[in-house]
Amino acid sequence: MRITIFGTGALGCLFGARLARVAQVTLVGTWAEALAAVDARGILLEEGAESRTVRVGTARLGARVPAADLVLVLVKSWQTAGIVPHLGPALGEGGAALTLQNGLGNLERLGPGVAGGVTTEGATLLGPGHVRAGGSGPTVVAAPEWAAGLLRRAGFDVRRCAPGEVRAHLWGKLAVSCGINAVTALLGVPNGELLARPAAEEMMVRAARECARVAESAGIRLPFADAAEEARAVAARTAANRSSMLQDLLRGGPTECDAIQGAVAAEGARRGVPTPVNGMLWLLLRAATEGKGNR
């Protein structure tokens, strides 16, 4: 079984290292330092008190790779358009492609042949090809059972959903991301710190509930009753984690704020649902990364 993973960041390395137990894995990306590090020593994965190196294949985006049974898309949302031309050549006959990316718009850009899903696995990138596993959580996919089974055998908590249910799960994760990612990034704190700061927690609550109201206006029923309580639960479960958006800011790189807070603000404007908190968080994140190619 062959798996190609587009993305060499935290999730790409986490999924690559675990899936290498059950399949031949190739990481594909544009980050030269990460590809070189993985080529030299393998992926360095830290889980709990243990660390190990895992050998996988690597390829520069655009290079020829063996046809894969499963293609995982784990790049940042602002990189999605750049990999679309490479998906078809990477996928073998009868294979499946699956995206577990953050934010809105990725499925539409990738096209109808790609299955959607969400993951709540936590991962912190410590350096090129070096990742620390964080809080473990469920992954929901609209992929074939054999693909879900492959992920389970690699150690992921996976359940399948119908393709028509993916949108609700995407918006569910979006609500949590709106609540946690931007606030932790702007304050420079790990997730759990939001629960120790009343003003920060209130900002998280308001952002999550705004997103939920936009989803409700679009006829989307989230997979939980209260977006604020879900955000609190995730922040507690992943208390020591640095959100992906905070990691982006600390590296001085672009964030996914356009696909998260920006997308919620835009959809709210289209539907007449006010989103003042998400709109302001989006502007603050863009201001923090101006000149750095923010997406």
Image (tube, rainbow, N blue to C red):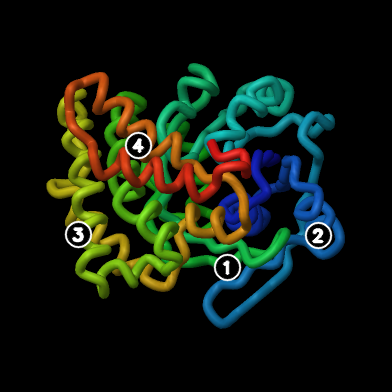
Question: Which callout, 4 or 3, points at the residue further toward the start of the chain?
Answer: 4
**Along the line of sight, which residue is nearer the eye, 157 or 201?**
201
Question: Which callout, 2 or 1, points at the residue further toward the start of the chain?
Answer: 2
- Identify the residue at horizontal 77%, vertical 34% (top origin): 61
> What separation in Å lies between label 2 and label 1 (alpha carbons)?
15 Å
- SS for tag 1? strand
**Along the line of sight, which residue is nearer the eye, 139 or 124?**
124
> What separation in Å lies between label 1 and label 4 (alpha carbons)?
24 Å
Question: Which callout, 2 or 4, points at the residue further toward the start of the chain?
Answer: 2
Q: Position of residue 172 (x, y in %)?
A: 28, 42
Q: Given contact means CB atoms under 8 Å apart, are the residues at marks 2 and 1 in contact?
A: no
Question: Which callout, 3 or 1, points at the residue further toward the start of the chain?
Answer: 1
> What separation in Å lies between label 2 and label 4 (alpha carbons)?
32 Å
Q: Few, some or many C-alpha atoms within 10 Å of disc 1 (few <14, some 14-19, many ≥20)? A: many
In the rendered structure, the answer to whether residue 67 lies left or right of residue 232 reads right
- SS for tag 3? helix
Q: Which mark is in front, 4 or 3?
A: 3
Residue on which the image places disc 1? 132
Mark number, residue 170: 4
- SS for tag 4? helix
As drawn, which residue projects farthest toward the bottom?
A: 49
- Identify the residue at horizontal 64%, vertical 67% (top origin): 126
Mark number, residue 37: 2
Q: Quadrant of residue 73?
A: top right
> What separation in Å lies between label 3 and label 1 (alpha carbons)?
29 Å
Task: Look at label 1 and name its amino acid.
Answer: Arg
> What separation in Å lies between label 4 and label 3 (alpha carbons)?
23 Å
